[in-house]
């Protein structure tokens, strides 16, 4: 009998750096997920994140880079499940829902930044049905180059508008997706 208290630990991705590598925020999330896995909270680490809207156009997904980092921290490949289609938090929840159904998971620990946790929990509770969700917030850690990528990208107007709209329109979007 397992001593795990959740079926899976879901770690949400974060924008990749221009060179396609993980930034400090994403690494901090993965480190927290690995810590929870190694402590026995759950036997599986699900890493969620696609190419994103404003990340590098390398074809590398956030989930793939998080997997490489988790394996470098000692997580066996067999303990990792990837969700690499999502482009934002709503997509994280939408595609994680498919994994939950596929694997028959009933509980998950949700790992993301403190600043994103309330919105992520709101979205996950509406899109991932009949699952207990345990929030695991991680302090936000931004390096200067990551702030530069957010504030000085050639797509900054679109990026900032998307951040503002996704934070404020998440309830409506969840309702729309729920009706599809």
Image (spheres, rainbow, N blue to C red):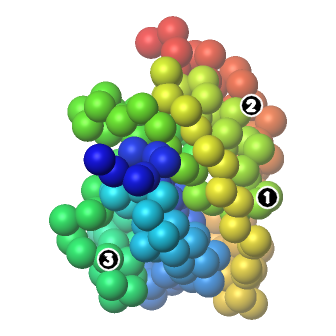
Residue 50 image position (x, y, % from top left): 40, 57
For label 2, the SS is helix
For label 3, the SS is loop
- Residue ID for mark 3: 75
Is 157 displayed left or right of 42 in the figure? right
- Residue ID for mark 1: 115
Which residue is drawn at the image coordinates 61% and 29% (left, top)? 125
Q: Label 2 crowding class (10 Å Cα cut-off): few <14, some 14-19, many 20+?
A: few
Separation of disc 1 and disc 3 at Cα? 27 Å
Is 58 displayed left or right of 145 in the figure? left
For label 1, the SS is helix
Q: Is residue 43 above or below residue 59?
A: above
Which residue is drawn at the image coordinates 73% and 81% (left, top)? 142
Q: Nearer the viewer, residue 76 or 98?
A: 76
Q: Label 3 crowding class (10 Å Cα cut-off): few <14, some 14-19, many 20+?
A: some
Q: Nearer the viewer, residue 179 or 136?
A: 136
Q: Is residue 83 above or below residue 103?
A: below
Mark 2 or 1: the one toward you: 1
Name which quarter of the figure residue 145 lies in. Answer: bottom right
Separation of disc 2 and disc 1 at Cα? 16 Å
Q: Is residue 88 visible?
A: no
Which residue is drawn at the image coordinates 52% and 15% (left, top)? 178
Residue 104 image position (x, y, % from top left): 29, 31
Separation of disc 2 and disc 3 at Cα? 36 Å
Mark 2 or 3: the one toward you: 3
Location of the C terminus by quadrant is top left
Which residue is drawn at the image coordinates 79% and 58% (left, top)? 115
Residue 144 image position (x, y, % from top left): 74, 90
- Residue ID for mark 2: 169
Q: Nearer the viewer, residue 33 or 63?
A: 33
Mark 1 or 3: the one toward you: 3
């Amino acid at each position: 009998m397992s001593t795990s208290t959740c079926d899976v630990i879901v770690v949400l991705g974060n924008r990749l750096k221009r060179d396609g590598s993980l930034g400090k925020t994403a690494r901090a999330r993965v480190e927290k997920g690995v810590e929870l896995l190694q402590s026995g909270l759950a036997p599986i680490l699900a890493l969620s994140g696609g190419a994103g809207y404003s990340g590098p156009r390398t074809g590398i997904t956030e989930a793939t880079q998080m997997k490489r980092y988790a394996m470098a921290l000692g997580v066996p490949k067999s303990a990792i499940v990837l969700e690499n289609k999502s482009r934002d938090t709503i997509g994280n929840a939408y595609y994680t829902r498919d994994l939950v159904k596929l694997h028959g998971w009933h509980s998950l620990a949700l790992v993301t930044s403190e600043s994103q946790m309330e919105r992520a929990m709101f979205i996950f509770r509406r899109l991932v049905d009949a699952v207990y969700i345990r929030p695991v917030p991680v302090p936000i850690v931004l390096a200067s180059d990551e702030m530069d990528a957010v504030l000085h990208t050639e797509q900054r107007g679109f990026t900032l508008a998307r951040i503002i709209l996704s934070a404020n329109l998440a309830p409506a979007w969840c309702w729309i997706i729920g009706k599809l």
